[in-house]
Amino acid sequence: MKRIPFSSLLIIFLLTQSCNRHTAQSGLRQTIVWQPSHQTDTGKDFSEAATCNGIVEAAMAWNPLKEYKVWSLGKKEYHHADSGSNTKILHTTAIIDEKNSGYAYELKESNNKHPNVFIAVHNNGGTKRHAVWGYIHYGDKYESANRELAGRLVKAICSATDMENRGVLLDSTTGRNDYSCRESGKLSFFSLDENVNTAPFRVLLEIGDNAASHDFLQTPANQKIIGEAIKKELVVWLQEKRK
């Protein structure tokens, strides 16, 4: 029997390892879209856009996948590109001076990427709680899966920080403003509405409070911890979905 040289065996081994790594990564080929808040009118000496973008940038930098950020900040061709509510018709679907809103621009950009997972990142306000909340859309067929994903992401953030876990809520329960889903008729987050957002898995994270978490959220090291915690749990969730 002809012996295979050690050098050839080594090459075969290395090629096998490379293929295994490629296969593992290809299983994570889902497309991810991140939507950091573009709101700059969010409290004294506090820009929600800046803190949320820091969190999203940290998430995208850790173990990069096929992912994109949609963000209207600074785009003057859209109204409410750096302010406004995700639950108000005026700030989402209204046409003002022949311009679409910043939120409408972001969702159009997201849909063009055909994502499997959409994660919006915001900070809360007026709660007096140093905490994390997850929000999902009411009533569509992915509600249960989105509840699981949001719950896991909230738990991951709280485990990596000293923030309180406030659980997962339906966007129909906020009682905010006047945007509603045409299917359910209930108040909704524009960014999570299945009629607006084509991603099957859609969650919105309210991370901290612009008063109770004021200094904590503006610390780059904390933004990095939060962003990486989200991404690490997301990767685990994606791997489980692949099986």
Image (cartoon, rainbow, N blue to C red):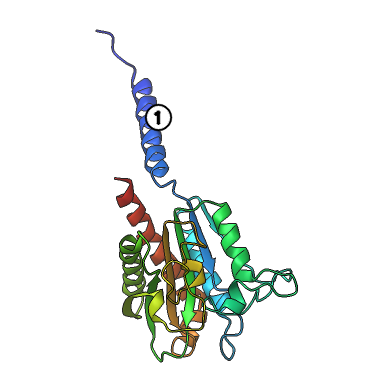
Q: Quadrant of the N terminus?
A: top left
For residue 70, say whether it is visible: no
Q: What percent of the width, then of the height, locates residue 65?
A: 47, 51
* Callout 1 amino acid: Leu
For this view, does 241 lie left or right of residue 128?
left
Q: Nearer the viewer, residue 9 or 153?
A: 153
Q: What percent of the width, then of the height, locates residue 72?
A: 64, 68
Quadrant of the image occupied by residue 155:
bottom left
- From the viewer's perspective, is residue 51 above or below residue 43? above
The number of discs equals: 1
Q: What percent of the width, then of the height, locates residue 94?
A: 64, 74
Q: Residues within 10 Å of mark 1 (few under 14, many from 20)?
A: few
Furthest toward the top, the residue is: 1
Q: Nearer the viewer, residue 173 or 224?
A: 173
- From the viewer's perspective, is residue 112 above or below residue 217? above
Q: Residue at x 55, y 70 (%)?
A: 53
Quadrant of the image occupied by residue 227:
bottom left
Badge 1 marks a residue whose secondary structure is: helix
For this view, does 142 lie left or right of residue 82?
left
- From the viewer's perspective, is residue 135 above or below residue 127? above
Quadrant of the image occupied by residue 73:
bottom right
- Give the residue at mark 1: 15
Q: Nearer the viewer, residue 238 or 226?
A: 238
Q: What percent of the width, then of the height, locates residue 141?
A: 35, 59
Q: Residue at x 63, y 64 (%)?
A: 105
Q: Quadrant of the C terminus?
A: top left
Q: Residue at x 44, y 49 (%)?
A: 30
Q: Nearer the viewer, residue 186 or 122?
A: 186
